[in-house]
Amino acid sequence: MTFVTQEFFPKIGGAATVVGEMACALERLGKSVRVLAPGEAQESDSRFRFEVERSGTRGKQDWLDRIALLRTLKRRAAEGEEWVFSDPGAVRAALYARWFGIRFRNPPVIILHGTDILRFTSFPHRRFLLRKLIGQCRCVHVLSEYNRNLLSAKLPHLSVPVVTAPGAPSKMPAVSPIASGTDKAISILTVGRIHPRKGQLETLEALSRLPVAEQRQIRYRIVGPSVRPRYRKRILQLASRCPFPVEMVGPLNEKDLDEEYRSADIFAMTSRQDRLSVEGFGLVYIDASAYGLPIVATRSGGVPEAVLDQKTGLLADEGHIDEISENFLALIRSADLRKELGRRGREFASGLSWDQTAERVFGAPFPGNP
């Protein structure tokens, strides 16, 4: 089984995480697995127990990379591999497989994440091609019921199974309970690329509306690469007027990111739909819960399936800044509430596993399978 992807380690992101974790899970379950990933071979590929083959593509979704990936797949089509098109770049290339003379000897699996469903179905020709591609598949994997319902609304009456199987934490770290009554500033953490969909500006606006006494108790840490310079500039402009420190630290490696989670008291990502970009699930919320962090988030896309309102975090309606601010205020003022939501979050995250997800997607019998 070969996972075909245009997003993979060392790039950090939701799709890259899904590919790596699913491949590891299948390998643990005794499957023969390889990953066809972008870029050139590197020493870090040896960290994986499965084979990583580099396609030489740049990890983009443009026509140059689509054609390069399709040429690679055409050379391998006769080998009879079962392909898993596992990120938007790979799926976008696969839409045009038949124009390159590629025939699937084994029905593939595709993984859809949310934004890709919107983008592939908002234009008639892509919607037509996606339906044709899905019709050749063994199944479609989505990480949330939101994605399943979105796909059903955009492409009704699909003839193949759509399997909902959520993501899981990358690890369950050993963490100390959140202390109460400490003198240090309450650290609020967001992890995600600097993008309107991730809601860093809304988070900062909500924090800036807190009473001054609470603002003086906090600091806000933003971890992730900057992909929208104008959006980043707006965040910095607002940050300059806030009486609490706002630190944009950029992307981090695994060790430093682990330390960020351990140093935080509250995790926040107040997502909102940005045109054709939506949070289909949100693996980062599950990781935050695994560290025992209470979460402030929004009812956007599939987020309510990753953050359980009043159980693992506090949800506000998308874009409702005052409601988000009230949720922050409740957590800042109550260490007990932070501790309780964090404890429940750990329980929730520990009940999820990539092995279970892989079994649900690849272990269940599908039409035409022996």
Image (spheres, rainbow, N blue to C red):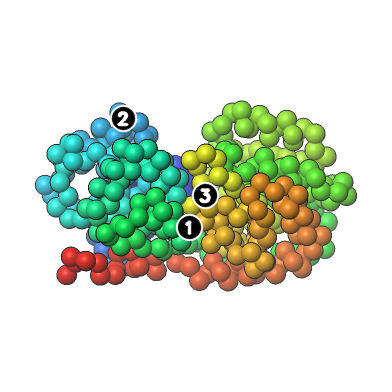
Q: Would you call the spot at circle 3 few (<14 residues within 10 Å), some (14-19), or many (20 or more)? A: many
Secondary-structure class at tag 1: helix
Residue displayed at 78% across by 64% down: 335
Report the quarter where the C terminus lies.
bottom left
Q: Earlier in the sequence, mark 1 or mark 2?
A: 2
Secondary-structure class at tag 3: loop
Residue displayed at 28% across by 55% down: 109
Q: Which residue is mark 2?
A: 63
Left/right of residue 272 with respect to residue 208 in the rendered view: left
Left/right of residue 314 with respect to residue 53 in the rendered view: right
Secondary-structure class at tag 2: helix
Kind of residue sitting beneath label 3: Glu
Front residue of 238 and 144: 144
The answer to whether one can see residue 316 in this image is yes
Front residue of 168 and 258: 168
Q: Would you call the spot at circle 2 few (<14 residues within 10 Å), some (14-19), or many (20 or more)? A: few
Establish if 124 lies above or below 364. Answer: above
Front residue of 93 and 117: 117
Q: Which residue is mark 1?
A: 146
**Where residue 17 appears, x then y in whole percent?**
44, 51
**Where residue 290 appears, x then y in whole percent?**
57, 63
The answer to whether one can see residue 263 in this image is no
Give the Cα distance between marks 3 and 1: 10 Å
Contact flag, marks 3 and 2 (Cβ < 8 Å): no
Kind of residue sitting beneath label 2: Trp
Q: Nearer the viewer, mark 1 or mark 2?
A: 1
Kind of residue sitting beneath label 1: Tyr
Residue displayed at 33% across by 43% down: 127
